[in-house]
Amino acid sequence: MLICSVIGNVWATRKEDGLTGLKFLVVQPVQLEPDNPIQPAFIAVDRIGAGLGDRVIVTKGAPASYIEEKGVPVDALIIGIIDVIGRGENGD
Amino acid sequence: MLICSVIGNVWATRKEDGLTGLKFLVVQPVQLEPDNPIQPAFIAVDRIGAGLGDRVIVTKGAPASYIEEKGVPVDALIIGIIDVIGRGENGD
Amino acid sequence: MLICSVIGNVWATRKEDGLTGLKFLVVQPVQLEPDNPIQPAFIAVDRIGAGLGDRVIVTKGAPASYIEEKGVPVDALIIGIIDVIGRGENGD
Amino acid sequence: MLICSVIGNVWATRKEDGLTGLKFLVVQPVQLEPDNPIQPAFIAVDRIGAGLGDRVIVTKGAPASYIEEKGVPVDALIIGIIDVIGRGENGD
Amino acid sequence: MLICSVIGNVWATRKEDGLTGLKFLVVQPVQLEPDNPIQPAFIAVDRIGAGLGDRVIVTKGAPASYIEEKGVPVDALIIGIIDVIGRGENGD
């Protein structure tokens, strides 16, 4: 999973079926430390209440689509809001 | 999901089975802002009426193939037409 | 899906089960225009009669494996032979 | 699968459902030899007791999610702790 | 699928369940010609008897995991040993 910062929002009225009600955020993949960008920002689904500035764990690809039984056409999902991350035993 | 601009069309008469009737567009992945290209253009399926110049949300990989129960051999799908996107709370 | 040119052939007698009879071609991903290479050539399955020099649409990843019910261990499939592709409304 | 070194830990209290109890580690993809970094560090699930400094085999994408029948929304899994790896017949 | 050369071996005693008995090799993705490296070496499963120095076809991602009905947590599989590959009609 990627380490990302939440940096923005996106609104889209016209969408594929089955996406209604999902929240889409703009996330920026970052290095472990310092948290410099490592690739361009992209869009991920959030169902756990992530907010701007949060550092989050993002799952990409098919596993991001398992949020419903039959699969949803999304390829990025915020799966955790990071409390502590870092090098070494204690994550710092 | 990638942020892309719709830049062109593609026609292909000879195709794999199960693709008849699908519309294929050329999309260009772009940065959040400014919308400079970040990787080469590729081809995505459109089922929501995206048009040239639209900024769209594109899902890649297996989740793009869920448009039919048994899976269709496509790996990119336009899932939303962007109204507003940007940094910060209000998407601007 | 990637825009590719068909540039060569590959023969492999010893193969995983379930691949007998499949045709493998060497394809070169190219830019929309001009059609310069954008990444190294790779191998894709062809079931629609693509030939050397054809410009084709290639699906990668799991959706390329749907050519049989239970999935075949291939990750790239030629899904269309391009008639016309380009920028703008008419594909040119 | 990628060759990685385990370099850190990550804690996330707020998570997607179905992830409780999974251990997340920070892993650094490295070259075969010398073990220089080849891409930015990312987060992988560990169920086999990998520790800091271990060199491990990491599976990415959908196969990493097969740890439960219905699939779990994770895209990286440590599948082995490397004893010996290298060029040539004896792995050294 | 990628064109790779088999360059080494890897041993891992401690592994995820379901991987016992699988042979893991180190493979190096190469250009079509000359066969220069195009990205770092990685690890792939071999079930067809590939050996050091062989040029092989490697499938990545979920299709590599279809070697058992329920899916195995591996993301790279050697699917063929290349006899001849090259540009043009005759693969040379």
Image (spheres, coloured by chain):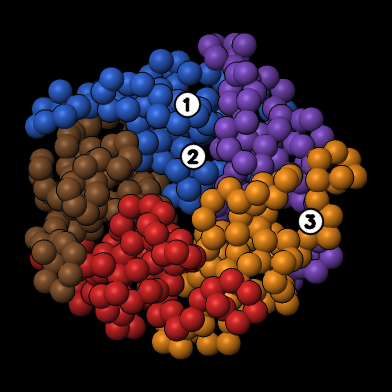
Chain colours: A orange, B red, C brown, D purple, E blue
Same subunit under labels 2 and 1?
A: yes
Q: Where does the image place residue D67, in percent across and percent down from the top left? A: 67, 55
Residue with the most extreme right position: A90
- Could you say which is closer to the camera, residue D36 or residue E7? D36
Q: Are marks 2 and 1 in contact (CB under 8 Å)?
A: yes
Query: Label 2 amino acid?
Result: Ala
Residue that badge 3 annotates: D22
The chain to which mark 3 is attached is: D
**Is A31 positioned to the left or the right of E58 in the image?**
right
Secondary structure of the residue carrying numbered label 2:
strand
Marker disc for residue A76: none
Query: Label 1 amino acid?
Result: Val
Viewer can see residue B65: no
Query: Label 3 amino acid?
Result: Leu
**Residue at the spot 22% in from the left edge and 32% down from the top edge:** C10
Q: Residues within 10 Å of mark 1 (few under 14, many from 20)?
A: many
Secondary structure of the residue carrying numbered label 1:
strand
Note whether C38 is above or below B20 in the view shown: above
Viewer can see residue E34: yes
Q: Residues within 10 Å of mark 3 (few under 14, many from 20)?
A: few
Residue that badge 1 annotates: E27
Please state, as top left, top right, bottom left or bottom right, where the C terminus of chain E lies in the image: top left
- Rounded to the nearest whole Å, what is the CA distance between mark 2 and mark 1? 10 Å
Marker disc for residue E76: 2
**Is D87 positioned to the left or the right of C33 in the image?**
right
